Image (tube, rainbow, N blue to C red):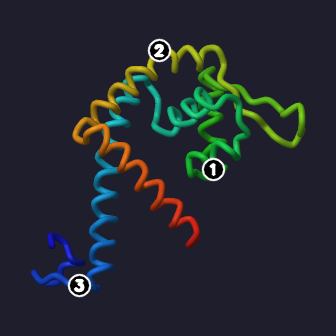
């Protein structure tokens, strides 16, 4: 086993087979996510956006107008961060906020035509870059990994 637990003076600690396996899995996932995130961030930087800005635009591009709180939940970020990012995107002309016609308490975020044009232009190349990054896995492996990660994620949400 490569990494059974924290090293102490050259020796590995073990917390039992199941715990060691889970810890190794978590470390592998975290390292992979960090590497893939750096690839994505470098690509997104070419468009003059941060990852958070791109993520907000992307979710609106694919899902349509959404309440700010829904965007935050989808992207797993705080409402304060979403508000800050929405302020930036609104100032750049990529997003606008409107009160919901059904519930005036709800503020919807919508792409402007400028935001839509930005994603029309750049999202296909970003998607291609991410597909290129995933090429280390076969299509079948990519599908299996996505299924397994969703399964793991759903199971851990029950523990929260």
Residue at image location 21% in from the left, 77% down from the top: 4
Helix, strand or loop at label 3? It is: loop
Q: Which mark lies nearer to you, 3 or 2?
A: 3
Tell me the CA gap for discs 1 and 3. Answer: 36 Å
Tell me the quarter of the picture where residue 115 sits: top right
In the rendered structure, the answer to whether residue 8 lies left or right of residue 153 reads left
Residue 108 position, x and y percent, is: 75, 34
Residues 148 and 130: in front is 148
Tell me the CA gap for discs 2 and 1. Answer: 27 Å
Residue 89 position, x and y percent, is: 60, 29
81 in relation to 1, above or below? above
In the rendered structure, the answer to whether residue 57 lies left or right of residue 12 reads right
Looking at marks 1 and 3 on the same chain, the residue that comes earlier in the sequence is marked by 3
Contact flag, marks 2 and 1 (Cβ < 8 Å):
no
Residue sitting at the far front: 140
Residue 146 position, x and y percent, is: 41, 48
Q: Residues within 10 Å of mark 1 (few under 14, many from 20)?
A: few
Residue at image location 33% in from the left, 33% down from the top: 42
Looking at marks 2 and 1 on the same chain, the residue that comes earlier in the sequence is marked by 1
Helix, strand or loop at label 1? It is: helix
Residue linked to disc 2: 121
Q: Residues within 10 Å of mark 3 (few under 14, many from 20)?
A: some
Contact flag, marks 3 and 2 (Cβ < 8 Å):
no
Residues 65 and 99: in front is 65
Residue 81 position, x and y percent, is: 60, 47
Residue linked to disc 1: 73
Contact flag, marks 1 and 3 (Cβ < 8 Å):
no
140 in relation to 117, above or below? below
Tell me the quarter of the picture where residue 148 sits: bottom left
Residue linked to disc 3: 14
Q: Which mark is residue 28?
A: none
Residue at image location 34% in from the left, 58% down from the top: 30
């Amino acid at each position: 086993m490569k990494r059974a637990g924290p090293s102490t003076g050259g020796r590995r600690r073990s917390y039992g087979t199941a715990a060691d396996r889970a810890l190794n899995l978590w470390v592998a996932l975290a390292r992979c996510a960090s590497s893939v995130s750096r690839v994505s961030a470098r690509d997104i930087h070419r468009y003059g956006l941060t990852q958070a800005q791109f993520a907000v635009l992307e979710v609106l591009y694919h899902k349509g107008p959404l309440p700010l709180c829904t965007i935050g939940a989808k992207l797993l970020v705080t409402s304060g961060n979403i508000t800050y990012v929405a302020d930036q995107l609104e100032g750049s002309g990529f997003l606008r906020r409107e009160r919901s016609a059904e519930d005036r308490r709800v503020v919807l975020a919508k792409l402007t035509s400028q935001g839509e044009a930005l994603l029309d232009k750049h999202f296909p190349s970003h998607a291609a870059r991410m597909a290129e990054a995933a090429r280390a896995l076969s299509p079948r492996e990519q599908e299996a990994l996505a299924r397994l990660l969703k399964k793991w994620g759903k199971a851990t949400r029950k523990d929260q």
